[in-house]
Image: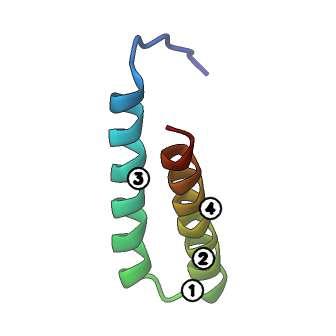
Amino acid sequence: MDSYFIETDKQHIDGIFYQMMVDETIRLRNCHNRKERSEIRTFLLRAYQTITESVEKT
């Protein structure tokens, strides 16, 4: 596996995180497997909690 160093800032990381949430929401709409749907929901809930905690700290 190759490793990469990317210079970034909080705004860029937040943008990537939001895009991941959108992608997973779309994936949830098209998913029929129960276990996978559960994992996607868990990810979305944790992501939301992370974002709200981040906003509260600022």
Label 4, secondary structure: give it: helix
Between the residue at mark 3 and the residue at mark 2, the CA separation in whole angstroms equals 16 Å
Disc 1 marks which residue? 33
Three-letter residue code for mark 3 = Met
Three-letter residue code for mark 1 = Asn
Q: Badge 1: few (under 14), some or many (20 or more) residues near its Cα, within 10 Å?
A: few
Q: Nearer the viewer, mark 3 or mark 2?
A: 3
Q: Position of residue 34 (x, y in %)?
A: 62, 88
Could you tell me if the residues under marks 4 and 2 are in contact, i.e. CB atoms within 8 Å?
A: no
Label 2, secondary structure: give it: helix
Q: Earlier in the sequence, mark 4 or mark 2?
A: 2
Task: Decide which of 30, 47 is in the foreground and name it.
Answer: 47
The N terminus - image quarter: top right
Q: Nearer the viewer, mark 3 or mark 1?
A: 3
Residue at image x 43%, y 13%?
Answer: 6
Q: Badge 3: few (under 14), some or many (20 or more) residues near its Cα, within 10 Å?
A: some
Q: Earlier in the sequence, mark 4 or mark 3?
A: 3
Q: Nearer the viewer, mark 4 or mark 3?
A: 4
Disc 3 marks which residue? 20
Disc on res. 46: 4
Could you tell me if the residues under marks 4 and 3 are in contact, i.e. CB atoms within 8 Å?
A: no
Disc 2 marks which residue? 36
Could you tell me if the residues under marks 1 and 2 are in contact, i.e. CB atoms within 8 Å?
A: yes
Q: Earlier in the sequence, mark 1 or mark 4?
A: 1
